[in-house]
Image (tube, rainbow, N blue to C red):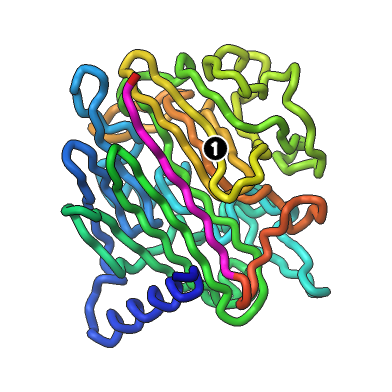
Amino acid sequence: MSSKINLLICLFFILHLWAAATVTGHDIGIYEIKKGDFSIKVTNYGARIISVFLPDKYGNISDIVLGYDTIEEYQNDKSYFGAIVGRVANRIGGAQFSLTGTLFKLIASGGANILHGGPKGFSNVVWTVSEYEKDGPNPRITLTYHSPDGDQGFPGDVLACVTYALEDPYKLLVEMKADALNKATPVNLAQHTYWNLGGHTSGDILSNDIQIFASHITPLDQSLLPTGEIVPVKNTPYDFLTSRAVGSQIMELQGGYDINFALDSTEEMKPVAIVHDKKSGRVMNLQATAPAVQLYTASNLKKKGKGGFVYQPSAALCLETQGFPDAVNHPNFPSTIVTPENPYFHKMLYAFSIE
């Protein structure tokens, strides 16, 4: 089934729910999907992953993502815990871009630029639950959101759709789709979960081993915007082509890791990264269809989270598969423009195991 047809099905569900006068699309809830001792919880506020439970090498089941206890805390969150960010993830320089000869001025957030879709981006809206199977052979939840023409300054209506599904053994599949309903527009969705494979209260992730299948990065200027260059990681702290500890060279950087890696593989579903926490034995192997991934080590984090636990700097890492940041202002970057004829599709697979 084409992604275009899937998006039309999502639109049908929205119209059906509206016609039935339900409140599903307006109420904020928490939804669990589970498969044996593997489970996740999702809220339709920002289509966020708010917990992921799975066992370690001793059989102890822990929550391996950072988050909060209440929806109100997510509504006040500035760190994008677990959210789908968009319409365009990462930064757009000067909060503006030109498309087909028209200059679009966006609503700035984070200084003069726009970050993660703006102050009312996809992470800060209520999504509609269009499909929900809590358990059984195919546990899954699908959420949809209609972003209107002019939303945060972006052109055209967009129908976005994300599905979270659990598969054997210990696999989380994430599919993000978006249909430009009437105009060309940039779309670049990312999943912004903060991962700590030792458990969300286990301390920092600096001893985790990580391998990233990327030989190049897109370096940043002082405004955290890409310079437009694509440079090799060889002989830099960004070289994770061979697995090593996250913190082994982090002191050479100011503010830890927050950089976009250009993935090497040209396959549609490509290897992204492998993370291993030796203490718990948990391993996360990530694959995706996106051309890049942002590694973020939350080096300035200090927040009270679940159970009142205070998350300290480097308490988690984010691996946000994405299009290149600020691609709308860099013609040499892969395009993030979506048209009615060419919908957006982004698939991620998290495969968890024990070593």
Secondary structure mostly seen in magenta is strand
**Towards the viewer: 95 or 253:** 253
42 with respect to 313 (left or right): left
Residue position marked by numbered label 1 in the rendering: 271
* Residue at the image point whose x is 66% and y is 22% from the top: 239
Quarter of the image with the C terminus is top left
* Residue at the image point whose x is 64% and y is 73% from the top: 339
Q: Position of residue 90 (x, y in %)?
A: 61, 48
Q: Position of residue 270 (x, y in %)?
A: 56, 42
* Residue at the image point whose x is 34% and y is 62% from the top: 142
Residue 345 sits inside the magenta stretch? yes
Quarter of the image with the N terminus is bottom left
Q: Position of residue 48 (x, y in %)?
A: 37, 51
**Towards the viewer: 207 or 164:** 164
* Residue at the image point whose x is 24% and y is 54% from the top: 139
Residue 346 sits inside the magenta stretch? yes
281 with respect to 106 (left or right): left
256 with respect to 40 (left or right): right
Which stretch did the figure color magenta? 343-354
Q: Residue lying furthest bottom in this view?
A: 19
Task: Say above or below: 282 vs 343.
Answer: above
- Tell me if mark 1 has few (under 14), some (14-19) or many (20+) residues whose alpha carbon lies within 10 angstroms of its own: many
Number of dots carrying numbers:
1
Q: What amino acid type should be assigned to the residue bearing mark 1?
A: Pro
- Helix, strand or loop at label 1? It is strand
Task: Say above or below: 57 vs 190.
Answer: above
**Towards the viewer: 259 or 347:** 347
Task: Say above or below: 156 vs 221.
Answer: below
